Image (cartoon, helix red, strand yellow):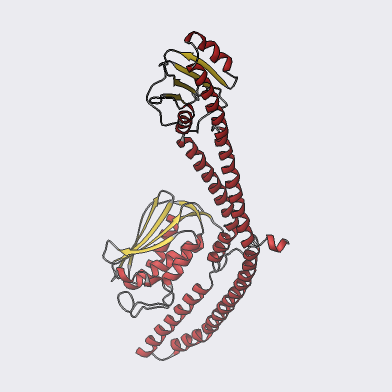
Amino acid sequence: MARFFGSLLTRIALLLLAALVVEFVGASAINAWQRRQLISREQISLIVGHLAMAQHLANNSPPQARARIMADLGSPQLQLSWSPTTALPAQPTAELGYTRRAIIAATKQPGPADVRLRPRDRESRSGMMGALRLTDGSFLTFRAQPLYDTAPPRIPLLGLHLALVAAVMLAALISARAILQPLRNLARTADATGGPAGPGFQEEGPLEVRQLAVALSAMQGRLLKALDDHTESLVAVSHDLRTPIQRLRLRAALAPDGEWREAFAADLIDMERFINSVIGYMSRGEIEEPRLVDVAALAMTAADDAADAGSGAAVDYRGPDVLAIETQPLALKRALGNLVENACKHAGVVLIRLEREDDWVVLTVEDDGPGIPAARRDEAFLPFHRLNAGRSGVHAGAGLGLTIVQNIVADMGGRVRLSESSMGGLAAEIRIPAAA
């Protein structure tokens, strides 16, 4: 039984059933109220019969006795009187058409029928009033008590039905949202899979959603394990390659002078950089705890380090002397270092800019190199993807520099953007939150 009522199909069916029941009960209540506001056909027949009898007596009685006779014929529900004239208008109203036709059919007096009716006054709670012309031109007047009424106005009645439909729809949407919330939680968890400290799937909601959560959780475990195994294998191989590379560099240094020795040493350096890039890409590691960091000092240090590295590029810093925020210093230093190193490989002038924009800190590395065409800038972030022109060439690496920067900045809650530099080269912008 619990399995049956815990299924998604059952919950949706119960939701629809509850909505229909509420709509039916509400509509029935409105209709019952509406019926209480109407004169029933039986009540109209009684009124018409009473009026027909009173008309007959009034037509056959002397005028001086008509007032007394009508008073004697009246009842608590229908008050009768006689008057030579009436204040009711002669033109018929659109309401009480059935009642007017019934009175005309029952009285059957000669000549044009003159029946004047006024519906109930809802503000004063007075009943329906009417006047019936007699054969001598005088009037038999009557008043029905408030228990007799006319149909309620259409606009309020339509408003009641629309309000009922809106209330039922709102309640159904709230209930449906509660039923579907576990599915949205699964979608968010699945989207976060593979990221740092990704959440696990929660077994909640209807039976089908819980079964899906179990299956996704098992699949998530298999995928993460395969990814960890792949990462560990690649990192282990890269580490193991460092030892023979170091031996080859030592042998190249001890070899006799010659052009081949310099070329051989340069190739070994490129191989070592490639391995370092692969290890950096595959080993994102744990999330670094944010702490108070002077980003200006970090940027100036990056400029000094690049200038001391002997790349041949002129590196300059422009920005405030102090800009302290809560962030991850090692991660930011690594991302900025990758951008500066990449710019120094392809340009003669490199500029590091730092500025504060509302809740963001913006670090921009500009150069006067060949740049990257706008149509291919998205390709630059693809892992192991090296552009065939522009900023590739003799300095081409593993194709992971910008990918690593993008991963680091994304983990910090920021974003990276490439654009054209004011010096004609490439501008790489890092935008990170000013507060962790």
Front residue of 127 and 221: 127
Front residue of 105 and 201: 105
Residue 142 screen position, x and y as percent: 51, 20
Quarter holding residue 114: top left
In the picture as drawn, the residue positioned furthest to the right comes out as 1
Q: Is residue 30 above or below residue 186?
A: above
Q: Is residue 71 above or below residue 319?
A: above
Quadrant of the drawing holding the N terminus: bottom right
Residue 377 screen position, x and y as percent: 34, 69
Name which residue lies at 50% across and 63% down.
331
Q: Is residue 323 above or below residue 233?
A: above
Report if residue 308 is visible in the image. no
Report if residue 24 is visible in the image. yes
Front residue of 216 and 104: 104
Image-based side of 5 in relation to 285, left or right: right
In the picture as drawn, the residue positioned furthest to the left comes out as 424
Name which residue lies at 51% across and 45% down.
166
Residue 7 screen position, x and y as percent: 65, 62
